[in-house]
Image (cartoon, grey):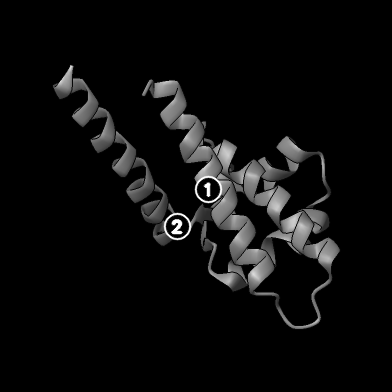
Amino acid sequence: MTRALNVQLHNIAFSAFIFQEIFDNPLEDETPQSRLKQIGMMSILYIMHQGHDTLTLSNIVETTGLTRTGVTETVDPLVRRGLLTESFVKNSMGRGKARRFEIAPAILEKIRIFQGSHARADDAVETKS
């Protein structure tokens, strides 16, 4: 399998996993619209993660065009679900605190395992050739 196909499968696995986690485990008083927003936000955050962008509120606002409140309303449930981790760092000016998010390591590990199984299959095909 080509590297491009591996990347594509990795992206599909991430999307499917996030979809299942959000829709199969609704939070109390959560609307279907909120869950859809969360899926969309996780897709954007994953693309930012792959591009090595820092996932701060300011960067997410800049990327999405949403307001800070709009980003916060969508990101906070993702933190509660454990799909994102949150930490506080100094802001870009070094004077205040900024919220920084990361995709939960457990999620990335699950996706890495998926990618690894395809890499082993690729190696087996190459050795038979």
Disc 2 secondary structure class: helix
In which quadrant will I find the N terminus? top left
Q: Callout 1: few (<14), some (14-19), or many (20+) C-alpha neighbours within 10 Å?
A: many
Residue kind at label 1, given as amino acid type: Phe
Q: Which residue is mark 2?
A: 107
Circles 2 and 1, Cβ within 8 Å, touching? The answer is: yes
What label does residue 14 carry, if any?
1
The answer to whether residue 73 is seen in the rendering is yes
Tag in front: 2 or 1: 1
Disc 1 secondary structure class: helix
Compare residues 118 and 48 and report the one nearer the observer.
118
Q: Callout 2: few (<14), some (14-19), or many (20+) C-alpha neighbours within 10 Å?
A: some
Picture quadrant of residue 98: bottom right
Examine the rendered structure and indicate whether residue 23 appears above or below residue 45: below
Q: In the displayed image of the protein, which residue is found farthest to the top?
A: 129
The mark nearer the N terminus, 2 or 1, is 1
Residue 12 spot, x, y in % from top left: 55, 41
Picture quadrant of residue 27: bottom right
Compare residues 39 and 8 and report the one nearer the observer.
8
